[in-house]
Image: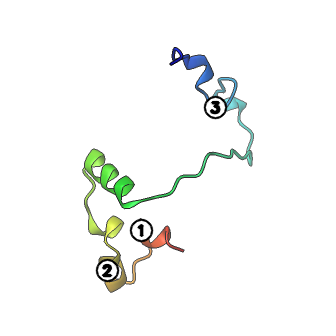
Amino acid sequence: MTEFDPAQHRMVPDQRWFEDFVLGERFVIPSRTMTTAVFGAFQAASGDTHPVHYDVEYCRARACRTCWRMVSRR
């Protein structure tokens, strides 16, 4: 196994500061499949267990479109 080199562990090659960014600039990041395990880990880490974010039936019953599981299935 090779030694970890933080200099090589970057998504962008150089450090940039707020004033270096240009309005409208886009960044492509690797995609990630949102699974039940990912949602569960976030709930556990953040303490956010409100059903509006995670319970599809709760959202449907209230005509709510903020449930991430509903959004991710589109």
State which mark lies toward you, 3 or 1.
1
User: Where is the C terminus found, in terms of image quarters?
Assistant: bottom right
Tell me which numbered mark, 3 or 1, is placed earlier along the sequence: 3
How far apart are the two marked residues, 2 and 1, measured between alpha carbons? 10 Å
Q: Are marks 2 and 1 in contact (CB under 8 Å)?
A: no
Count of labels in the image:
3
Tell me which numbered mark, 3 or 2, is placed earlier along the sequence: 3
Residue 66 can be seen, yes or no: no
Taking the spot 69% from the left edge, 23% from the top edge, the residue there is 14
Q: Dot 3: few (<14), some (14–19), or many (≥20) neighbours within 10 Å?
A: few
Tell me which numbered mark, 2 or 1, is placed earlier along the sequence: 2
In this view, the residue in front, 32 or 57, is 32
Taking the spot 75% from the left edge, 40% from the top edge, the residue there is 22
**Residue for badge 1:** 69
Taking the spot 44% from the left edge, 75% from the top edge, the residue there is 65
Q: Are marks 3 and 2 in contact (CB under 8 Å)?
A: no
- Kindly indicate the quadrant of the structure image that contains residue 9: top right
**Residue for badge 2:** 57
Taking the spot 40% from the left edge, 69% from the top edge, the residue there is 67
- 16 on left or right of 42: right
Question: Label 2 is placed on what type of residue?
Answer: Glu
Rendered view: 59 above or below 23: below
In this view, the residue in front, 2 or 16, is 2
Disc sitting over residue 18 in the figure: 3
Q: Dot 1: few (<14), some (14–19), or many (≥20) neighbours within 10 Å?
A: some
